[in-house]
Amino acid sequence: MLKGKRCGGCNEIIREKFLLKVDDQYWHVSCLRCCVCNLALEEQQSCYLKHDNIYCEFDYTKEFGVKCPKCLRVIFAKDWVRKAREFTYHIACFACDSCKRQLSTGEEFALRGDRLLCKPHYIDLIEGGPGRESASSQKPKAKRVRTTFTEEQLQFLQAKFQLDSNPDGNDLEQIAAQAGLSKRVTQVWFQNSRARQKKYQQQRNKINGSSRTLSPPTGVNSSPPSLWASESDSQHSDNYPSE
């Protein structure tokens, strides 16, 4: 049945016992490779065909995938995103173009062309015109802009903290990328969580020395407080550097 079939890569007749098939085209196992990185694809779960070229998943997404309109980087399947109209943003990039504050879930915003604005700066733009909005954006900020975490980001960070409360630099970069945050914000969050955990443990040790038991907050188990969705986390009152 397969007698005389030619390889889509080298165009030689396939005589081997095993072969690969992509979109009605047959390939030698050794010939099916990504046209960009030359990765052998026989053990990959998927590959992509575009304009008669074969791509691995990473290079296909990099070449033809959706790009964030803010940073212009490719959005991969594992990235956390927010969508506005036809645009898809990285979570860390979904911020007001005027005040640079990251917008949170449920918060009202506006798109003016390719500009993303929070509600206050959109109102300034509409009521005061471009001149007022521009002047407002140039005023010195009295307070540091705080980073707002989503519930999904907090759950992800807390799960990572449970595995390793003091990750090294490389691990922090990976965690930050997966959470859609900057490395600096992620580092400060871990520092604050370790401080809360240390404070809680000191309180327990002090009371245990007096033969008393420190009860956890009502409705919460006895896990360290760094793993709780504490008020400071849920209300984002910790002072984090801006994105």
Image (tube, rainbow, N blue to C red):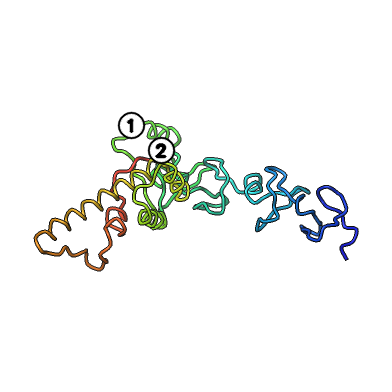
**Which amino acid does the dot numbered 2 rest on?**
Gly
SS of the residue under disc 1 = loop
Q: Count every numbered label the image shows and give the total.
A: 2
| Foreground: disc 1 or disc 2 | 1
Image location (x, y in percent) of residue 202: 18, 53
CB contact under 8 Å: marks 1 and 2: no
The answer to whether 4 appears left or right of 131 in the picture is right
Residue 205 lies in quadrant: bottom left
Image location (x, y in percent) of residue 143: 29, 38
Considering every residue shown, the one lying at the far bottom of the view is 219
The mark that comes first in sequence, 1 or 2, is: 2
Image location (x, y in percent) of residue 154: 37, 55
Question: What distance separates the C-alpha of mark 1 from that of mark 2?
Answer: 19 Å
Q: Which mark is residue 140?
A: 1
74 and 8: which one is in front? Answer: 8
The residue located at (31%, 58%) in the rendering is 227
The answer to whether 16 appears left or right of 172 in the picture is right
**Which amino acid does the dot numbered 1 rest on?**
Pro
SS of the residue under disc 2 = helix
- Estimate how packed mark 2 is, as few (under 14), some (14 to 19) or many (20 or more) residues with alpha carbons within 10 Å: few
Q: Relative to 27, does residue 181 appear above or below in the rendering?
A: above
Residue with the mark numbered 2: 128
The residue located at (36%, 53%) in the rendering is 161
Indicate the quadrant containing the C terminus: top left, top right, bottom left or bottom right. top left
Q: Relative to 136, does residue 147 appear above or below in the rendering?
A: below
Considering every residue shown, the one lying at the far right of the view is 4
217 and 72: which one is in front? Answer: 217
Q: Which mark is residue 66?
A: none
Residue 206 lies in quadrant: bottom left
125 and 230: which one is in front? Answer: 230
The residue located at (40%, 52%) in the rendering is 104
